[in-house]
Image (cartoon, rainbow, N blue to C red):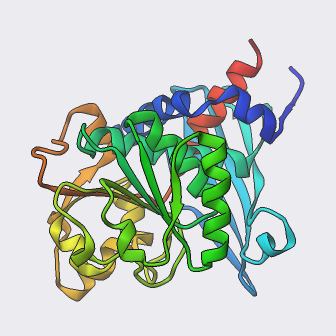
Amino acid sequence: MALEFIDASRVAQLLPMADCIGVMREAMIATSAGVVDVPLRQSLTIGDGKSMLFMPGSAKGLGFYGSKLITLHADNPAKGLPSIQGFIALFDYNTGEPRAIIDGASVTGLRTAAASGLATDLLARRDATTLGIYGSGLQATTHIDAVAAVRPINDILVWGRDHCAAESFASSESVRTGLPVRAVSDPEHVASCDIICTVTGSPTPILRGDWVARGTHINLVGSHSLDTREADTALIQKARVYVDSMRSTIAEGGNIMIPIDEGAIDAMHIVGEIGQAAAGDIPCRTDGTQITVYSSLGITSQDLYAAAHIFCHSRQ
């Protein structure tokens, strides 16, 4: 079988958002069940806002193993280039033969948002209709699609550190989605929404607990190290907290580990993994007044399941 190369345009065709949310449900249930081998990702800091990530994993049940190799260049958007670039290499589980090289940036954008979509479907109130986005990059776009796939969103507020960029984003997303998307200059206004997604990569909190109303669901997505976080301690203290992986959270989850290190909460404050919630092994939201938080770090099982779906559908 020839090695297949699958670019970003084909990724979008082969894995639409609604399908990707279903694939993430399978991936996260498998992860929490321990049937996917997912080592912690390795990173190489190159300097000047540049780094490279190596994310290997194996899923016998899928019939594949592989790795995602991506680069992160924070200054690329100013050059008109994506900040994330790279690929996923997919290998046959039984023979080790390489099966596919798949665009990594597009899969990352899809699967990260789809995991948030899964968490939103499990944890957000059924009557939630408003969405708040912190950030205006690729993940902001895909998170609009993911949340709108699971809740009847009718109003979207966007905040970004660059207000002009946020306004441009809001204008283009209004046209693309047909939904009312508005940029706001005060980050507190975004926190009035029923569902909130933080996709900024900010090293310090941009979302405060005293802004957030009861009944809100929040997806924390942009922080991926022990010394960075997008939410303050007060928010984590008052929320029911779910994570994608307990192991990754301990190694990389500043949103959760900083409050633990401060003594504000302990590890028992984490309800569990989102895969456990999807499998029905732990409770989701139990009433309409709770604040729920999904802390997303992104794990290789998400990439493997997405890549396997893409590859198998490309052969049909």
The residue positioned farthest toward the top in the image shown: 316
Total marks placed: 0
In the picture, measured across the screen, residue 133 lies left or right of residue 140, that is left
Residue in view at x 32 percent, y 76 percent: 257
Q: Nearer the viewer, residue 55 or 186?
A: 186
> Would you say 89 lies left or right of 160 here?
right
Residue 230 as seen in the image, left or right of residue 316: left
Q: Position of residue 32 (x, y in %)?
A: 34, 42
* 214 up-or-down from 162: above or below: above
**Residue ID at (40%, 35%):** 150
Residue 197 percent location from the top left of the image: 43, 59
Note whether residue 112 is visible: no
Residue 94 higher or lower than 112, as above or below: above
Residue drawn at 50 percent across, 83 percent down: 203
Q: Residue at x 37, y 37 (%)?
A: 151
Foreground of the two, 52 or 153: 153
